[in-house]
Image (cartoon, helix red, strand yellow):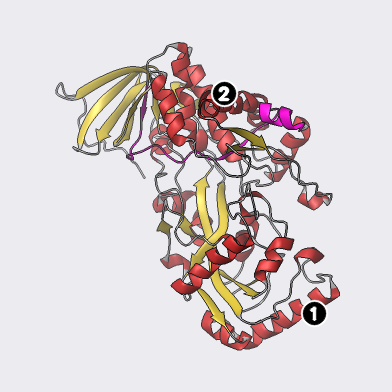
Amino acid sequence: MNTNDDSKDYNTTDIKLISTEVLIIGAGNAGLMAAAAAEKGVKTLVIEKEHTINLLRLSLGGVDTNAQKRAGIKINKFELVEYLAAFAQHNVDEGLIYHWVNNSAEAVNWVEDNVLQPHGAHLRAEPDIGEKNPIYKAFPTQNDVTKDDNTFASYGKWFQEKVEEMGVELLFDTSLVKLEVDNGTVTGIVAKNLIDDKYFKIRATKGVILCTGGYSANKELLSKWNPLALKKNVYNDSPRNDGAGIMAAMNVGAIKDEAPAGCTFDRGLVPIGTRTEDMYVQTETYQDWLWLASHPLLKVNVRGERFANESTPYEFIVNAASKQKGYLYAMIWDSNFGKYAAQFHTLGCARIGFPGYMANVEKLKADTEQYVDKGLIVKAKTLEELAEKLHLPVENLLKTVARVNELSAQGVDQDFGKEAYRLTPVAQAPYYGCMLGGRLLCTFDGLRVNKKMEVLDEDYAPINHLYAAGNDSGGFFFGSYPDRVPGTAASHAQTFGRLAGKQAAQN
C-alpha cells in the first residue's frame, strides 16, 4: 500500500508554502511532547488530521520520577529492562529500553511541573502490588494524574495550552501526504487541508518528526503486517491511526520492525452469533466496552469448554482464544459477581477503586447491567437456558460449570492452576453470559530508530532530518503489551517524543 498520491505534480508555483524549523506530525502523547523543541526557541509546527488533539494517557510509566521519590518507591532498572527484554524474547533493541528508563523520569517530571501543577494537579505513584508469586512479577512504574489522590484528572486541554504558550502552532484538519527529500535529507512534506481539499507544502529546515500513532485503523496494513490482530480483535479503539507516518517514511527508504506488536484489551463485547471476520468496529468512544470482562470469571470457547487460566494479563486470554475455533469466547458468571469482584484484587484500570475506572462494586454492577438492557449480555434462570441464548452446546457447558464448581469447592484449580481466591463457582441464579473478543488499542511495530530518534534506512543509517516517536517508532515492543509494567506505552511515547523534539532542535 502506498499512501502517497504520486500521480499529482506538487512542484507547481501556485502551491502554497509554509516554512518552519521543526515539523511534528500528530498531536498525541508523542507529538505534543515533541513540541519540547520550542523550549530552545525553535519555530515549531504541529499538524493533526483530526479536529482535536488525541487522548493523553492518565497513567504514565517511569523510573525514579519525583512522584516515586515522594512515595519512597525505588525500581531496579536492570531487573526492569531484563524483564521487558525477556518478555519480548529479546526481539527488541535493548539499548532503546535502557534509553527509555534513563530518560523517562525527566519527561514525566516535565509534565508534572509544567502541565499539571499550574492547574493544581500532580502525579500519584502507585506502589508495588506485593505479589510474591514470580509468575505475577510486576513493577511499580505507574504515575497517575490526579488532584485529590482519589480520581483521575484529565490534562489534555492543559497540555495544549502549554505548548501554545511556548509558541508552538497547531494546525488541525491537516494530513500528511508525502515526505519530501533533497539529496538524502528530508526537507518537509506535502500536506492536505481536509476542509478545502487543497494541497500545500511545509518546509522544515531542522527536521520532521513522525508521531501519527501506528496503523491499527488500517485493515489493509493489518492484513499485511499483523493478520492475527485483525482476526482476534473486533474493535479498534484508535481510529486515527491509519499508518500514514510509517508508510510515508518507508516510501523514502525507511525500515520498520519485521515482527508485529500491539496492545489488546479483553473487553470487546459483541452480539451473539458474531463472526470475527465480519466485525472490526472503529470507535473513539469505547463502544460496548465491558469492564467486567477483565475479571477472572469463567471463560469458555464456542464449544462450551474452558481453555485457559482466566487469571492472566488482559491480552493473554485473547491470545489463548485465538487458538480456539472462531477466535471469540464466552464469559459465564452468576448473581454473586459483585462479591467476587471485591475479592479478585484486580489491578490497573480493571481495579475496583482508584486508579481503576470503577469507583466501587455497585458502579461495576450498574455498568454490567446496562448491557443486559442492550441485549449484549444475556441473563437466564437456568444454565440450560443460558447456553441456548449464547449458542453454546448445552451439555458441554453444563459439564464445564460442574467441573468449575467442583474445583471451587476443593479450593484447587487442578485443570489450569488459577489461584484459589479467584476460583469462583457458577451456582447462584440468575446466570449471566456474553461473547467477547479483543479490542486493539494500538500497534507498536514501527519504524526502526536509533537513540537520537532518527529513522533508519536499509543500511541502518539515519535518514537525515527524519525522526519518529510514539507508535510510529519501533524496536521497543514485541508481540503483546507488558501490562505488568503499567504506563509503559504512554511513557514510551512521551519520553521518546520529548527526545525527538530536543534532538531536532539541535540541528
Q: Position of residue 165 (x, y in %)?
A: 40, 20
Residue 330 belongs to the span the image colors magenta: no
Q: Residue 488's image quarter?
A: top right
In the image, the segment drawn in magenta is 45-74
Q: Position of residue 207 (x, y in %)?
A: 41, 20
Q: Residues within 10 Å of mark 2 (few under 14, many from 20)?
A: some
- Pick the front one: 163 or 280: 163
Relative to 494, say whether 280 is above or below.
Answer: below
Q: Is residue 393 visible?
A: yes
Q: What secondary structure do most residues of the magenta stretch adopt?
A: loop
The answer to whether 366 appears left or right of 44 in the picture is right
**Amino acid type shown at disc 2:** Asp
The kind of secondary structure element at disc 1 is helix
- Viewer-nearest of discs 2 and 1: 2
Q: Quadrant of the N terminus?
A: top left
Residue highlighted by disc 2: 113
Residue appearing at x 72%, y 28% in the figure: 70
The circle on residue 406 is 1
The answer to whether 149 appears left or right of 201 in the picture is right
Q: Position of residue 76 (x, y in %)?
A: 78, 32
- Pick the front one: 405 or 299: 405
Residue projecting furthest to the left:
14
Residue appearing at x 73%, y 42% in the figure: 86
Q: Earlier in the sequence, mark 2 or mark 1?
A: 2
Residue appearing at x 79%, y 64% in the figure: 421
**Amino acid type shown at disc 1:** Glu
Residue 47 belongs to the span the image colors magenta: yes
Q: Position of residue 283 (x, y in %)?
A: 41, 54
